[in-house]
Image (cartoon, rainbow, N blue to C red):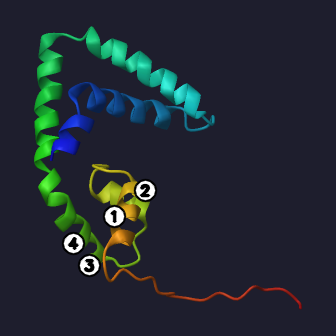
């Protein structure tokens, strides 16, 4: 829980929320990691100047977000039981992007007993 509290600060959640919207709105143009990092800094400055009311709302969302942390493992397992073929990206979306697809992949693949199976093999369609 301590790691989550350090990572999910009110400022970080505010910036991530706006950054997600920014990336979605710039869908057609490809954004570099430098552009995204610069935009995060812009959103951080905006957050510093937000009203007390907005900061209180963000803090309430932070507490709600942190309260989900103990439930994430169970939610991941539940989603995997429902759909064994779900992608990590879709799994992240099912968790309302509480954590990234890469984080979920690392956690799932590190579990004892993890294995992959091929659901359908499609041969290469060459003339050789």
User: For this view, does 121 lie left or right of residue 51?
Assistant: right
Callouts 4 and 1 close, C-beta under 8 Å: no
- The image quadrant of residue 9 is top left
Res 102 label: 2
Gap between marks 4 and 1 measured at Cα: 15 Å
Compared with 56, 60 (above or below) is below
Q: Nearer the viewer, mark 2 or mark 3?
A: 2
Gap between marks 2 and 3 measured at Cα: 19 Å
Which badge, 4 or 1, comes first in the chain's sequence? 4
Label 3 environment density (alpha carbons within 10 Å; few <14, some 14–19, many ≥20): few
Q: Where is residue 38 in the image (x, y as percent from the top left)?
A: 50, 21
Res 78 label: 4
Gap between marks 1 and 3 measured at Cα: 16 Å
Which badge, 1 or 2, comes first in the chain's sequence? 2
Q: Position of residue 30 (x, y in %)?
A: 63, 37
Which badge, 2 or 3, comes first in the chain's sequence? 3
Q: Nearer the viewer, mark 1 or mark 2?
A: 1
Residue of label 3: 81
Q: Nearer the viewer, mark 4 or mark 1?
A: 1
Which badge, 2 or 4, comes first in the chain's sequence? 4
Compared with 85, 87 (above or below) is above
Secondary structure under the numbered disc 1 in the rendered image = helix
Q: Which of marks 2 and 4 is in front?
A: 2
- The image quadrant of residue 27 is top right
Secondary structure under the numbered disc 4 in the rendered image = helix
Q: Position of residue 33 (x, y in %)?
A: 56, 34
Residue of label 1: 107
């Amino acid at each position: 829980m301590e790691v989550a509290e350090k990572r999910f600060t009110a400022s970080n959640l505010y910036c991530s929320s706006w950054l997600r919207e920014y990336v979605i709105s710039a869908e057609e143009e490809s954004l570099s990691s430098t552009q995204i990092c610069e935009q995060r800094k812009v959103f951080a400055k905006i957050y510093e100047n937000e009203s007390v009311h907005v900061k209180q709302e963000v803090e309430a969302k932070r507490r709600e977000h942190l309260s989900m942390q103990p439930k994430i493992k169970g939610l991941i397992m539940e989603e995997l039981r429902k759909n064994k073929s779900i992608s990590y990206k879709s799994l992240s979306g099912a968790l309302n992007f509480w954590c990234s697809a890469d984080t979920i992949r690392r956690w799932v693949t590190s579990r004892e007993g993890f294995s992959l199976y091929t659901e359908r093999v499609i041969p290469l369609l060459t003339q050789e």
